[in-house]
Image (spheres, grey):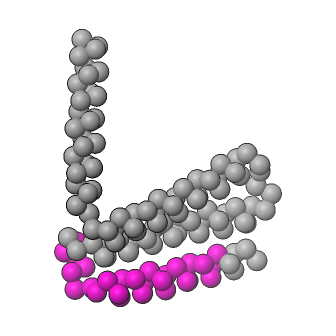
């Protein structure tokens, strides 16, 4: 019983992984680049958290600013991805240039706030 359910679970996981991979291969390149950027921002935030856990958080403002910068940038990039996606019917009238301009302006405001928080 245990071996059969394990092989069934493994088979289901492989089927799910293959279906996700085939669906993602149809994703436009611009969305894949945004996904890569989001992944990089999240990875950078995780590296900062691990560094703080290992070394310490003496300048806590710096740690908070770095993590919030990465997290905020990732959230804004996800919003950009939602707006640029052609399959999303909610933003069909919004040109991609406008969405990118919103992304840049919001990033500018985010990083001005973060620089102000640093002191």
On the image, the x and y values in percent for residue 97 come to: 35, 87
Residue 31 appears in which quarter of the rendering?
bottom left
Q: How many marks?
A: 0
Left or right: 57 in relation to 112? right
Residue 112 appears in which quarter of the rendering?
bottom right
Quadrant assignment for the N terminus: top left
Left or right: 10 in relation to 69? left
Q: Nearer the viewer, residue 85 or 75?
A: 85
On the image, the x and y values in percent for residue 55 come to: 77, 49
* Residue 101 falls inside the magenta stretch: yes
Residue furthest out toward the top: 1
On the image, the x and y values in percent for residue 56 come to: 77, 50
* Residue 45 falls inside the magenta stretch: no
On the image, the x and y values in percent for residue 110 come to: 56, 78
Question: What's drawn in magenta, residue-wise?
Answer: 88-114
Say which residue appears at 69% left-offset and 80% top-offset: 116
Q: Is residue 78 visible?
A: no
Q: 26 above or below 7? A: below
């Amino acid at each position: 019983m245990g071996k059969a359910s394990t092989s069934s679970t493994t088979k289901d996981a492989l089927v799910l992984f293959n279906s996700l991979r085939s669906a993602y291969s149809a994703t436009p390149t611009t969305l894949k680049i945004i996904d890569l950027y989001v992944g990089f921002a999240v990875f950078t935030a995780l590296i900062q958290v691990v560094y703080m856990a290992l070394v310490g958080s003496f300048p806590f403002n710096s740690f908070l600013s770095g993590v919030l910068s990465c997290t905020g940038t990732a959230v804004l990039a996800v919003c950009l991805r939602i707006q640029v996606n052609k399959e999303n019917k909610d933003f069909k009238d919004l040109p991609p240039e406008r969405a990118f301009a919103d992304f840049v302006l919001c990033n500018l405001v985010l990083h001005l706030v973060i620089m102000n928080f640093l002191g």
